[in-house]
Amino acid sequence: MVVFLTGASSGIGEALARHYAARGATLGLVARRADLLESLGRSLPAGAETYTADVRDLGALKAAAADFMAKHGVPDLVIANAGVSHGTLTEHADDAEVFRQILDINVVGMVNTFHPFVAAMRKAGRGTLAGVASVAGYRGLPGAGAYSASKAAAIKYLESLRVEMRGTGVRVATVCPGYIATPMTAKNPYPMPFIITADEFARRFARALDSGKDYAVIPWQMDLVAKLLTVLPNALFDAAFSRAGRKPRKQ
């Protein structure tokens, strides 16, 4: 199996890299932090091709994809996992740039990850493009407007891409994590129901893709919570979440 993965240096990305490496996959790993990425690559049983790049840089992603495919052929699986999360408040001028960064990384970065592979996968008539979104995209969470907006956009983008790829042999899968224990969620100053480890998420992620699912919420309990929130009347949602804890803003 040949797998290309962004956001690989820590958290969910690192867990996914280790999971697929344990299954004997040939890996191409992308992240911004070169030291962590190279250390991860060296620690894997068969090593990995590592590419230090920012997913906002389409040129860098195209170069990494071209190098990886030249060495290992068209991937069986491309995972767009790179993402960031910070608390944001529209009233703060400093947060305008944070909004831009979150949307660029979480949405445009996903497009940049998939773009270099689509033509080759379509020509081969096979492969899976898997995007990591979030249940935070189901409704707008207070104090996390940029993150919720980015993940809502990711969900809709992946849906559009799935329909576009219909009949080509290329599958598009949307995976929405709930609360996963990572450095990103460690900063959350509020309860996180049904939280699971990143390693457990990776196992469930792979199982969902292996089963042929094109949409999965992990853990499954958060699927029920998210669906309930989508049908909750605005008055009730607003009353309940106006008192909810807020993610810390970027310092």
Image: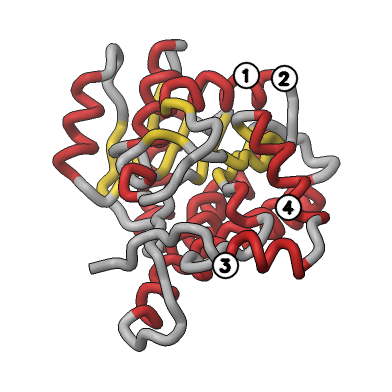
| Separation of residues labelled 2 and 1 (CA atoms) | 6 Å
Q: Indicate left or right for 111 with 125 as reference.
A: left
In the picture of the structure, the residue carrying the numbered disc 4 is: 229
Sequence-first tag of 1 and 4: 1
Q: Amino acid at mark 4?
A: Leu
Residue drawn at the location 40% of the way across and 65% of the way down? 87
Residue 213, horizontal then vertical, whole percent: 74, 29
* Residue 172 visible here: no
| Separation of residues labelled 3 and 4 (CA atoms) | 14 Å
Q: Residues within 10 Å of mark 1 (few under 14, many from 20)?
A: few
Q: Amino acid at mark 3?
A: Ser
Question: Is label 3 in contact with label 2 (beta carbons under 8 Å)?
Answer: no
Q: Amino acid at mark 1?
A: Arg
Residue 45, horizontal then vertical, whole percent: 28, 12
Q: Indicate left or right for 56 with 39 as reference.
A: right
Q: Which secondary structure lies at badge 1? A: helix
Locate residue 21: give its quadrant: top left
Q: Indicate left or right for 78 with 19 as reference.
A: right
| Separation of residues labelled 3 and 2 (CA atoms) | 39 Å
In the picture of the structure, the residue carrying the numbered disc 3 is: 242
Q: Residues within 10 Å of mark 4 (few under 14, many from 20)?
A: some
Q: Which secondary structure lies at badge 3? A: loop
- Which mark is nearer the camera, 1 or 4? 4
* Residue 65 visible here: yes
Residue 218, horizontal then vertical, whole percent: 61, 32
